Amino acid sequence: MSYLAEHVGIQSSAMSKIANNKGYNTSITTIEALCQFFECKIEDVVEYIPD
């Protein structure tokens, strides 16, 4: 996970929270960086779950 965090430009602890805490809020900048890294669309890394 530290490899991904380093390439996305965030701390490993933040990457861990994104991966392990359902409902964790992160920035659109981080989401964009993840999409660039994985060469995917936002809907591939984000899921909307209504209350």
Image (cartoon, rainbow, N blue to C red):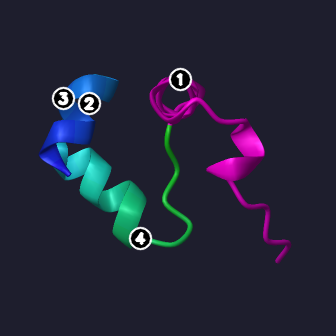
Of the pair 38 and 48, the residue shown nearer to us: 38
Residue that badge 3 annotates: 6
Q: Which residue occupies the extreme right position in the image?
A: 50
40 with respect to 7 (left or right): right
Q: Residue at x 36, y 71 (%)?
A: 20
Q: Marks 2 and 3, how far apart in space?
A: 6 Å
| Foreground: disc 1 or disc 2 | 1
Helix, strand or loop for disc 3: helix
Type of amino acid at the residue the image marks with label 4: Asn
Residue 36's label in the rendered image is: 1
Question: In this image, 15 relative to 47: left or right?
Answer: left
Comparing marks 2 and 3, which lies closer to the viewer? 3
Residue denoted by label 4:
21
Look at the image and give the residue range highlighted in magenta.
27-51
Percent across and percent down for residue 36 are: 53, 23
Give the CA separation, mark 3 to mark 1.
14 Å
Residue at numbered disc 2: 10
How crowded pointer 3 is (Cα within 10 Å; few <14, some 14-19, many 20+) is rated as few
Which of discs 4 and 3 lies nearer the camera? The answer is: 3
Mark 3 or 1, nearer chain start: 3
- How far apart marks 1 and 2 lie (CA) works out to 14 Å
Judging from the image, what secondary structure is the residue with disc 4 in? loop
Q: Circle 2 sits in a helix, a strand or a loop, which is it?
A: loop
